[in-house]
Image (tube, helix red, strand yellow):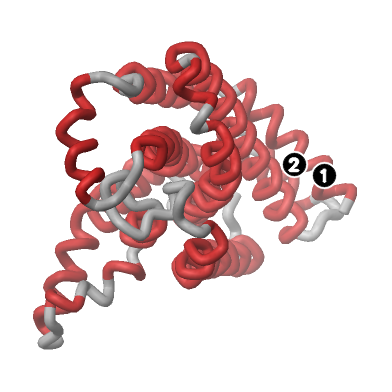
Amino acid sequence: MRNIGVIAVNEYTNLLRSKLILVIGAIYVLLFVKVMIEIQAPGNEAYSQTLSMIHMMGVGDSDYYTSVLLWNIGYVLWYYGAFFGMVLGVYTVAAERYNNTLNTLTVKPLYRDTILNGKLLGCSLFILSIFVLSILIYTGYIQFFWGGSFISLAEGYFVRLPIIALISLLYVLFFFSLSMLISLIVTDLAFALILSMMVKCFFVDALSVEISGKLTTLLGMNFNTGNPFHDFIPNGIMSSIFKKPIESNNILRPSNDLILALSESMPNVVKLLLYVVILVIISYIIFLRRDVA
């Protein structure tokens, strides 16, 4: 256990010193700032049409505004965070390989699973640190610019915020584990990173919805009852859990029972957790059984 902690701390400090992670972090910050700037305070004319629509659905203003706040920070954490996670997954293996420290680690009196456990722990803590910092900056910005309007929304916002962060962490860890697995198989850093991004953008984000739709049609299923494959795609899972503010049965709305909403979302959360576990297990097998140095 002590060795895992030492490797985790070393991994965390290496990430803090990495120029590549610094560049990716800067891009993440720019995208994050863009999201914050685009959020309008209550009373802005941009909300008028949407508010009229949700009033017809019996949804109050505070419910909608809280959902807007939570959906935006959630989107930053899980969507933009996924790209951050992919770079970390590739970097955590490739950096050791290029510095020839991975070979040094594997010949030390350490179990290989201890090395991988330490790296997983260190990177998970690093991602969690990014999440905490993002939430603090975002919440501070909203408190400053929304002023008194935020006070009435604070309770619903803070109650649901940890849930959003934890589920978003699972989503980011899925792509971290996927890219780490690719990096264990592909020895070239640049190619591993490009391949990881291609998998994320084309096979998970874009093609996954199209493929699932074609499978539904091929099997003669009715689209009116929904796409049965949608909730097995990582992005589909997240869109089912964190619906947009205007959608009904929304876990982000304070007026909806949180326990009931969580119980309905739990099958999708379990799927996401299962995907992460499967990817990590495959990474263990590859790391233990082949020369990755």
Q: Could you tell me residue 111's position as x and y percent?
A: 79, 60
User: How far apart are the two marked residues, 1 and 2, measured between alpha carbons?
Assistant: 5 Å
- Residue drawn 50% across the image and 48% down it: 168
- Residue drawn 82% across the image and 55% down it: 110
Amino acid type at mark 2: Ala
Q: Quadrant of the N terminus?
A: bottom right
Q: Could you tell me residue 260's position as x and y percent?
A: 51, 66
Task: Identify the residue under disc 2.
Answer: 8
Residue furthest toward the right?
Answer: 2
Residue 66 as seen in the image, left or right of residue 88: left
Residue 227 as seen in the image, left or right of residue 125: left
Task: Identify the residue under disc 1.
Answer: 5
Residue 144 as seen in the image, left or right of residue 11: left
Q: In the rendered view, tell whether residue 255 sits above or below residue 210.
A: above
Amino acid type at mark 1: Gly
- Residue drawn 69% across the image and 33% down it: 12
Q: Could you tell me residue 185's position as x and y percent?
A: 47, 57
- Residue drawn 34% across the image and 68% down it: 231
Do the residues under discs 1 and 2 have CB atoms within 8 angstroms? Answer: yes
Q: Nearer the viewer, residue 29 or 256?
A: 256
Element carrying mark 2: helix
Q: Residues within 10 Å of mark 1 (few under 14, many from 20)?
A: some
